[in-house]
Amino acid sequence: MQHLNMTLADEAATLALGKSLAHGLQAGLCVYLHGDLGAGKTALTRAVLHAAGHQGQVKSPTYTLAEPYQIMVNQQAIKFMHFDLYRMISPDEFIEAGFRDEFNQQTICFVEWPEKGEGVLPPPDLDIYLDIAAHGRRVQLHARSVLAERCLDHLNFAPNL
């Protein structure tokens, strides 16, 4: 499976990566976003959503746990769920809220802080690790499925170093 490492010089590079990732989105894709507070998980998700055609505001679902969006993928309306599990106390909250049903072949799911849902979340197609570095951010993308491989095949991105 594909594994990519890169350094992003600044927030503009993070947004450019998100825009590039949007070109490879497919229904059913599940992406886990790993990283400390301020590492760029929400900024990356916001860039993906805007590049996929969402016109409105993209807010962090820190308090609501989930925010739904409609985007266009290959001229087809697709549901995009943005989860932020940071404030979740127990994985049971995820099940009780009915979020597990959102992980299906018709929905794209991006999950921040997936370790908070360990044991109840399905496995990801793509793991993205963001780490704050001395200058910018280090990013690792790990494809875990054929769906993620196809997504990364569309990645046309050269970070500004």
Image (spheres, grey):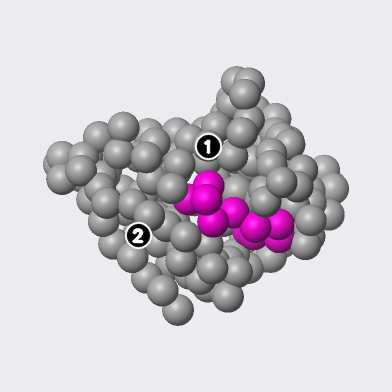
Q: State whether residue 32 is above or below residue 161.
A: below
Residue at 52% across / 50% down in the picture? 23
Q: Earlier in the sequence, mark 2 or mark 1?
A: 1
Query: Is 143 on the left or on the right of 84, as rendered?
Result: left
Q: Start and end of the magenta stretch?
A: 21-30
Q: Residues within 10 Å of mark 1 (few under 14, many from 20)?
A: many
**24 in magenta:** yes
Residue at 71% across / 35% down in the picture? 69
Residue position marked by numbered label 2 in the rendering = 140
Q: Position of residue 133 (x, y in %)?
A: 20, 45
Residue position marked by numbered label 1 in the rendering = 51
Q: Nearer the viewer, residue 91 or 14?
A: 14
Amino acid type assigned to the residue bearing label 1 in the image:
Ala
Residue at 53% across / 37% down in the picture? 51
Q: Position of residue 106 (x, y in %)?
A: 79, 56
Query: Is 146 on the left or on the right of 36, as rendered?
Result: right
Residue at 71% across / 46% down in the picture? 75
Nearer the observer, disc 2 or disc 1?
Answer: 1
